[in-house]
Amino acid sequence: MTLFLNNYLNGEWQAASSPVHTLTDPVTGEALATTGGAAAGLSDAFAYARREGGPALQAMSYAQRAAMLADAMKLMQAKKDEYYAISLANSGTTKTDSAVDIEGGLFTLGYYAKLGAALGDAHTLRDGAAGILSKDQLFQSQHLMVPIRGLALFINAFNFPAWGLWEKAAPALLSGVPVVVKPATVTAWLTHRMVADVIEAGVLPKGALSIVCGSSAGLLDALTPFDVLSFTGSADTAATLRSHPSLARDSVRANMEADSLNATMLGEDAQPGSPVFELFVDNLVKDMTIKSGQRCTAPRRALVPKVLMHAVGEAVAGRLAAIRVGNPRNPETGMGSLVSRAQFDSAREGLALLAAEASVLFDGAAQPLLDADPSSACMGPTLLGVRDADAATEVHRHEVFGPVSSLIGYRDAAHAIDIAHRGMGSLVASVYSADNDWMASTAEALAASHGRVHVVSPEVGKTHTGHGNVMPGSVHGGPGRAGGGEELGGLRALGFYHRKSAIQAPASVLERLGGRSTALTL
Ligand code: NAP
């Protein structure tokens, strides 16, 4: 019998309902699991999480909650083999690509467990020092951050069923805020399994973690003003959610992580075959093909000096040709599948749109697949070369969520920066050069439209963390098109799950806040 992914609400697993969605193996087409339709009783279930989960979590100190995160991480570390098997079957990813999601999620959980331990026995956070309000200096103001009274609803994307849960849940639970997660249906199995493991182990108090699989219907209707919503997914869905009355009228705090036309840039100082040229090419190929290009941070636009278009195109094409694409069960496979045939069709359609203003420099569709049928969701990597950098529009507008990148030739640094800005706000831009002055001024210019700027010189060629990798100590999120959100960034992430209030009081009262609070040092 096919596994049914049931909801966990009101502190108990809900009975299976009639299957509405089927999760499949994107390589073999095998049915893996099913989910039901709209969940019943969401308002009551959300009230339960606020009533039971919130107070139980908030009775603990930051250090106690951090210890809970560490326990959750440890128990999941012991079950990793099962998670890898689910990822292989449901996401069609190789072991290396599954690790980005699974190890990334557990690493982030461990990172917040450590940060939280350092906050000690406190229950609230002091933001800055007290400011004097009265002439006699007795009346002062202290900004105090207290955990929100509501819950955190996470609506997540299909590409990171593990990391997408824990990068949000770690700072939320550390803050003392109960979590309801709604994973993307197509890959909900791994999220469901991890949640089930943590619940079964009894690591968290009742009501601290709930899951809704299948339909998103009714989730936003069940939010009340003190809740928060953290969404990751497409810009179109983000736009729909923004107009919901919970956000538009009740001011539910929302963080949106949407799609992004990230850029990577090769410096003007590069010469074919030089160390920086090789670094750029190697990293572009890696970032295009990790998780088959299904990372929100993948470089969709690769900016190179116009005179180097041909040399970079040849070098990248050569590396892409060496990657075998197909069934991740075959050890020769370097890149697995897209997550579904629907994503495959969407990526091919997007590719056709971009190809109207670009030449195909490497066509992955012409390569044979390894142990996979052409009707599977496996898609070869494709490199495009934009014909006219100034006339092109779709390359700055349309995100192909697959192993596709477009080379764009720039004239000078100002032109390159202008092209990068045309993405109208992105998660990340990377810069490769051996010229420190050029890198510093370019990074500063790119910071205005990018949540993260990743700068690589040959000096850090072997040690940098990677354009596409999201490190929990650095903020993740970008302005404008990228959703305008901000996640992670170490303790900065806790801000979203706290309410900041200015306590205006006699100094003798403010002193007493110190017993339960700790200074927030970023
Ligand atoms: P999506 O179609 O927008 O779906 C995202 C989530 O929203 C899913 O859980 C989906 O549920 C849910 N959803 C869809 N319609 C909804 C509605 N009307 N109300 C409430 N929830 C709704 O995105 P996706 O295809 O899963 O993910 C791919 C996109 O995510 C890409 O564009 C990628 O760039 C972006 N992404 C961004 C980041 C980032 O950090 N910025 C990270 C990863 C991915 P169902 O699955 O049940 O439809």
Image (cartoon, helix red, strand yellow):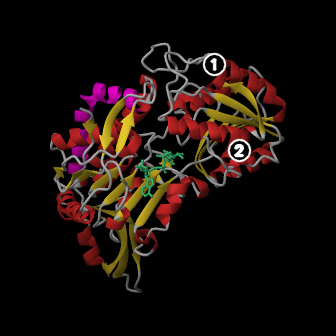
For label 1, the residue is: 367
For label 2, the residue is: 395
Camera-nearest residue between 175 and 381? 381
Rendered view: 522 above or below 369: below
Q: Residue 463, which numbered label?
A: none
Q: Are marks 1 and 2 in contact (CB under 8 Å)?
A: no
Tell me residue 54's x, y (percent). Answer: 22, 61
Residue 461 left/right relative to 41: right
Q: Specify the amino acid type for callout 2.
A: Val
Tell me residue 344's x, y (percent). Answer: 55, 35
Camera-nearest residue between 483 and 337? 337
Residue 237 left/right relative to 89: right
Numbered range of the magenta stretch: 64-90
Q: In the orientation shown, which residue stands out farthest toward the bottom?
A: 135
Camera-nearest residue between 111 and 329? 329
Residue 221 belongs to the span the image colors magenta: no
Q: Is residue 394 visible?
A: yes
State which quadrant residue 502 falls in: bottom left
Distance of label 1 from label 2 (alpha carbons) = 24 Å
Quarter occupied by the C terminus:
bottom left
Q: Is residue 300 visible?
A: no
Tell me residue 125's x, y (percent). Answer: 32, 62
Neighbourhood count class around disc 2 (C-alpha, 10 Å): few under 14, some 14–19, many 20 upward? many
Q: Specify the amino acid type for callout 1.
A: Gln
Tell me residue 77's x, y (percent). Answer: 27, 30
Write the residue at 19% across / 65% down: 51
Q: Of label 1 and label 2, which has the lower sequence position?
A: 1
